[in-house]
Image: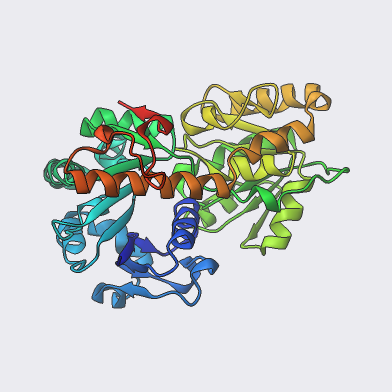
Amino acid sequence: MRVAIVHPWFLAFGGAEQTVSAIAEIYPEADIVTLFADQRGLPPQLAGRRVIVSRWNALPGKYRYYRHLLPFYPSLFEGIDLRGYDLVISSDSCVIKGVITDESAVHVCYCHSPMRCLYDQYWDYVEDMPVALRWYFKKTARRLKTWDFVAAHRLTGIVTNARYVANRVRTYYGLPSEVITPPVRTTDGFIDPVPEDYYLSVGRLVDAKRVEILIEACNRLKRRLIIVGVGRAADSLKAIAGPTVTFLGRVSDEQLAILYSRCRAFVFAAKEDFGITLLEAQSFGRPVIAFGEGGACETVVPSKTGLFFREQNAASLREAILHFEAIMHEFDPEAIREHACDFDAAHFKSKFSAFVELCIEAKKQQVPWTDVLPHDDASVPSRSIFGVIA
């Protein structure tokens, strides 16, 4: 069986790329196919793997301009040649699910999120752009949503990373999905008996992560904040940072493990689809202070593994930090780590491979994956092991 794993671009390393790495480990002979790739964005687990890039990879400054190619995404993604592949797995947070496959191929999509600028954040994008561009963006968005809807209905099956995303897939595409949470390397975690007095943020420095909220809160409270990550918002964030805020940029896995294990708490202000870093921090027994919407509600247990702040602003976070400091002795690092281990990468791999086998069987029977009946052959998973999000 020829397998292709399709990811839109490897230009920065984040949760989506970590998920692709785990899928690639399930299928060691699979080709990795992408529009753009940069050595900095390729996960180390893909070293030595066959990575096929499009001819557009030679585009100068692609990291700065790839988001502005939105009107051309359909033609770019349809231009990826997947003829001859029996199984295609797409890693989708834009519209790459629209790649064209052979009619006989099984196409499973791991949906990190329906593309935000087309759906739930549509009006935010419209209001933030110059007035002169709004008409063109609206026209482009209408065309892309139609194309994306049709592409979703060509899929054999959809996996989503959280119930929060599954509900949006049902809302925008009218389709069921199987929730399989992303892989987290919890086995790397350990508990340091003597944490230090800093708060920690890890992730890409982009506007959507709302890192400025963390900075403003720690500036006001004069709390130490260590920020790990790089991104296009780095300069503007450094401009507002006070003397208690430190930017480390990229760090090694060994350095990151120490930072996780010794932080007072991990702070997170984004409305994230899932948030792998929340669980990475918990795998080191450290509590989380997170904005209480989105995927964080599925990974943080209030009063056990962390707590939430309810308004996405610095004032609400400041209150949460002060509340945390008053009760921080009540959090049990062992219980926090135990909770995180439920999301380990090993669980992801077994669940994902089982779902792909289910989709292969559904393709053979020419029925939706939700209609596959239990089979006498033990190698074909029963529908009863899947929690369908209808």
Lateral position of residue 8 relative to residue 291, left or right: left
Residue 292: x %, y % from top left? 54, 25
Lateral position of residue 47 relative to residue 137, left or right: right
Residue 124: x %, y % from top left? 31, 35
Q: Nearer the viewer, residue 196 or 81?
A: 81
The count of marks equals: 0
**Image: 325 above or below 209:** above
Residue at position x 88%, y 43% from top? 194
The answer to whether residue 161 of the structure is visible from this angle is yes
The quarter in which the N terminus is drawn is bottom left
Residue 8: x %, y % from top left? 32, 59
Residue at position x 48%, y 77% from top? 48
The answer to whether residue 111 of the structure is visible from this angle is no
**Image: 236 above or below 278:** below
| Snapshot colouring | rainbow
Q: Nearer the viewer, residue 169 or 228?
A: 169
Q: Nearer the viewer, residue 140 or 349?
A: 349
**Image: 282 above or below 315:** below
Residue 93: x %, y % from top left? 34, 48
Q: Residue furthest right?
A: 194
Q: Residue furthest front?
A: 376
Residue at position x 37%, y 67% from top? 30
- Quarter of the view holding residue 55: bottom left
The quarter in which the C terminus is drawn is top left
**Image: 265 above or below 59:** above
Residue at position x 36%, y 62% from top? 9
- Quarter of the view holding residue 105: bottom left
Lateral position of residue 198 relative to residue 387, left or right: right
Lateral position of residue 174 relative to residue 224, left or right: left
